[in-house]
Image (spheres, rainbow, N blue to C red):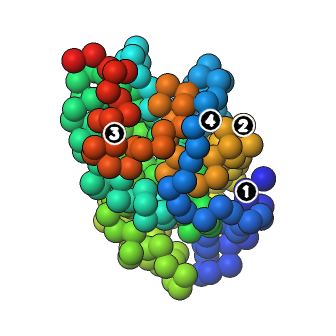
Amino acid sequence: MLFSRRRFVTSSVAVASVGSTLALAGCGDSKDSVDVKELLKPGALPEMSLGKADASVTVVEYSSLGCPHCAAFAEEVFPHLKADYIDKGKVRYISREFPLDQIAAAAAMLVRCAPQDKYFEMQDLFFTTQDRWHVPQNSVDALFALVKQVGFTRDSFEACLKDQKLLDGITAVHDRGANVFQVNATPTFFVNGKKAENFYSVAGVDQTLSGLVGS
């Protein structure tokens, strides 16, 4: 289990405490395949996806908002994936939470507390400002300073981080990824059920998807 029950100790709110050792952020994966039907089963939280539900290719990404590699993918590679594949109906993309520490877990909770249609915008906000909030000191204040710009009040901020059901859901998504699909680093990508070794650059995305999508 990733997270223990949270203890709020800094002002009136603090970040979720971590109950076990976490994998470090990295880009390593393997050629292992998983059961596609199992991979695509609904999890503990509503699935957040982009693209046509019946696209010939489904890409699942497990990421941590505090992971620099994930932020680099979001800023440098994902726009290409979206414009050339998702928006053209060739790929369905699914984003799943895999926070690697308590600060990233808190950020994931705040993304989920925003309106559902703002999920990917909120992810982008956290990725592009990672150096401002993913810090060991005063992380709670840094998180609030960020999200108050998009409409969070102190009350809604604190209520979000005190939502045990939400934390349990994020924990379940993380643990299922780790225990069932052997996710041990972020970002980890599955393309039609196979861990993608070469999905971290524009060229790698094109090479991986070549032959899987139509022209």
Disc 2: which residue: 180
SS for tag 1?
loop
SS for tag 3?
helix
The residue mark sitting in front, 4 or 1, is 4
Q: Amino acid at mark 4?
A: Asp
Disc 4: which residue: 32
The residue mark sitting in front, 3 or 1, is 3
- Considering only order in the chain, which callout, 1 or 2, is on the residue closer to the N terminus? 1
Q: CA distance from mark 3 to mark 4?
A: 18 Å
Disc 1: which residue: 2
Count residues near mark 2 (Cα–Cα under 10 Å), then give few for <14, some for 14-19, many for 20+: few
Q: Amino acid at mark 2?
A: Val
- Considering only order in the chain, which callout, 2 or 3, is on the residue closer to the N terminus? 2
Q: Is residue 172 left or right of residue 146?
A: right
Question: If the image is split into quadrants, where does the C terminus sit?
Answer: top left
- Do callouts 4 and 1 mark residues in contact (Cβ within 8 Å)? no
Disc 3: which residue: 205
Query: Can residue 114 be seen at all in this image of the molecule?
Result: yes
Count residues near mark 1 (Cα–Cα under 10 Å), then give few for <14, some for 14-19, many for 20+: many
Q: CA distance from mark 2 to mark 4?
A: 12 Å
